Amino acid sequence: MTRVEFIKIRRPEKALHLCRLAEEFFEAGHKIVVTVGDENQGITLDRFMWVWKKSAFVPHAYDNGAVDCLDEPVLILHDERNPNGADVLIMGRPCSPHFVGQFSLVIDFAEIYDDELATQARQRYIRFREAGFAVAMRQ
């Protein structure tokens, strides 16, 4: 069963959270897909993931379709694919329940610093619960 965990974000620092979580799950031996909204966000996150923390090394690639990234443990994508067979999805952008259901663990964000984004997160929480996923707030 897919488990969806929401993390509250109190400031617009999602890229930092994406990097921390990718590092956490990579170090635990998981393969990860990180979704972003568009190509610009993908390129930006790819660059940021190399420099966000001096002591961190998270082998990753932005999969824009130009090169083969199947062996990368962390893939950044702006579409709903799972080419590296990841078991963890970190949602930098909202994804469909059909796509979410392909993973054992999914991390989503409740961006409570913005009323509209918080409302959208509540709607996703309800939609994922109605889809039969185990949904909770991450501590």
Image (cartoon, grey):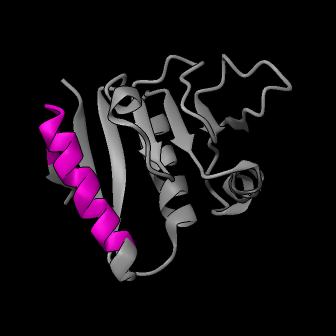
Is residue 134 shown left or right of residue 55?
left
Q: Residue at x 29, y 70 (%)?
A: 119
Above or below residue 80? Residue 17 is below
Q: Residue at x 47, y 23 (%)?
A: 86
Residue sitting nearer the eye, 28 or 10? 10
Q: Residue at x 13, y 31 (%)?
A: 132
Is residue 78 shown left or right of residue 96?
right
Is residue 116 shown left or right of residue 126?
right
Residue occupying the far right of the picture: 66
| Image quarter in which the N terminus is found | top left
Q: How many marks?
A: 0
Point out residue 138 in the picture as x, y percentages from the top left corner: 21, 56
| Image quarter in which the C terminus is found | bottom left
Query: Magenta segment: does it hold 38?
Result: no
Above or below residue 52? Residue 125 is above
Residue sitting nearer the eye, 43 or 132? 132
Point out residue 34 in the picture as x, y percentages from the top left corner: 54, 42
Is residue 47 shown left or right of residue 3?
right
Point out residue 35 in the picture as x, y percentages from the top left corner: 55, 43
Residue 105 in sight from this viewpoint = yes
Point out residue 133 in the picture as x, y percentages from the top left corner: 17, 34
Residue 8 in sight from this viewpoint = no
Q: Residue at x 50, y 33 (%)?
A: 32
Query: Magenta segment: does it hold 133?
Result: yes
The residue stretch that appears in magenta: 117-135
Q: Residue 97, located in which quarter of the rendered image?
A: top left
Q: Main secondary structure of the magenta part?
A: helix
Above or below residue 62? Residue 54 is below
